[in-house]
Amino acid sequence: MQTNYSQRLKLMHALCLAATARDDETPNTNLDEYDALNAADYLSSYVTFKAIQLAGRSPAAERSENFDMLSVYQSYALLAYVFFTSPLVQEGLEPDFHTAQITIAKTLFAGLPDAELVEVIESGFNKFKLIAEAEVEHWAEFRENLDKVVISFIVAGTDDESPHDGDEILPIFGQLLSQLCEAFESV
């Protein structure tokens, strides 16, 4: 049976939820109850959170020492979201980017006061646009690499014949986030 992309996305969402579930929680295994666009929201936040951890970053410390770095994380998650959702358009699903960026920010930065959250969203979107629209080779290469890693993550996590599993792909997300942070730290 051929599995379409939205089914893979929902499966990956379920697998990541199961991996992060507490011992007293029973994960939902009925993929019909998952939504592909919600899965993209979740997975964008999930890989960004994992990338932050794997890159050894500390958003709590950066909030007071380098607040702008939070918007770099937001822009990274937005780029991941675009790559998670772009294949869904072929299935007739249209992502709601505006809602997604708010959902992602509230997920990544739970507990931030609204004013700071708005600042992270706005600044993150500006950085996202800069990266998405840039024609400079290093930004084009960064976008291409993140796109490949997103697709590799989905395939690794949902294809039994994949030579890798999703956990093996996660460190690459961390490396890409480190590159992005370095680029904005040197500005």
Image (cartoon, rainbow, N blue to C red):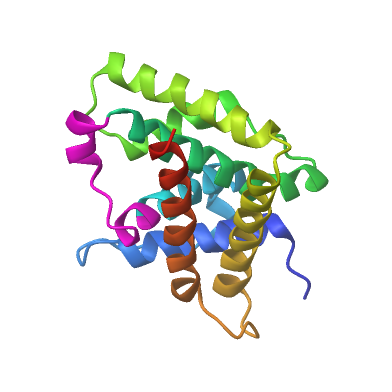
**Left or right of 157 in this view: 23:** left
> In this orientation, which residue lies closer to the viewer: 31 or 175?
175
**Left or right of 185 in this view: 4:** right
Most frequent secondary structure within the magenta stretch: helix
Is 57 included in the stretch rendered in magenta?
A: yes
Residue 64 screen position, x and y as percent: 17, 29
- Residue that appears at 44% across and 73% down: 167
Task: Kindly give the residue lying farthest to the front in the view shown.
Answer: 186
State the image quarter where residue 73 is shown: top left
> In this orientation, which residue lies closer to the viewer: 179 or 39?
179
> In this orientation, which residue lies closer to the viewer: 139 or 97?
139
Residue 10 screen position, x and y as percent: 57, 56
Is residue 55 placed above or below 64 in the rendered structure?
Answer: below
Q: Quadrant of the C terminus?
A: top left
Is 78 included in the stretch rendered in magenta?
A: no
- Residue that appears at 38% across and 38% down: 185
**Left or right of 40 in this view: 65:** left
- Residue that appears at 53% across and 49% down: 39
Residue 164 screen position, x and y as percent: 55, 81
Is residue 49 placed above or below 169 in the rendered structure?
Answer: above
- Residue that appears at 70% across and 31% down: 133
Whether residue 28 appears in this view of the structure is: no
Give the extent of the magenta segment. Answer: 50-66
Whether residue 177 appears in this view of the structure is: yes
Task: Kindly give the residue lying farthest to the top in the view shown.
Answer: 115
Total count of labels: 0
Residue 100 screen position, x and y as percent: 52, 32
State the image quarter where residue 94 is shown: top right
Q: In which quarter of the image is the N terminus?
A: bottom right
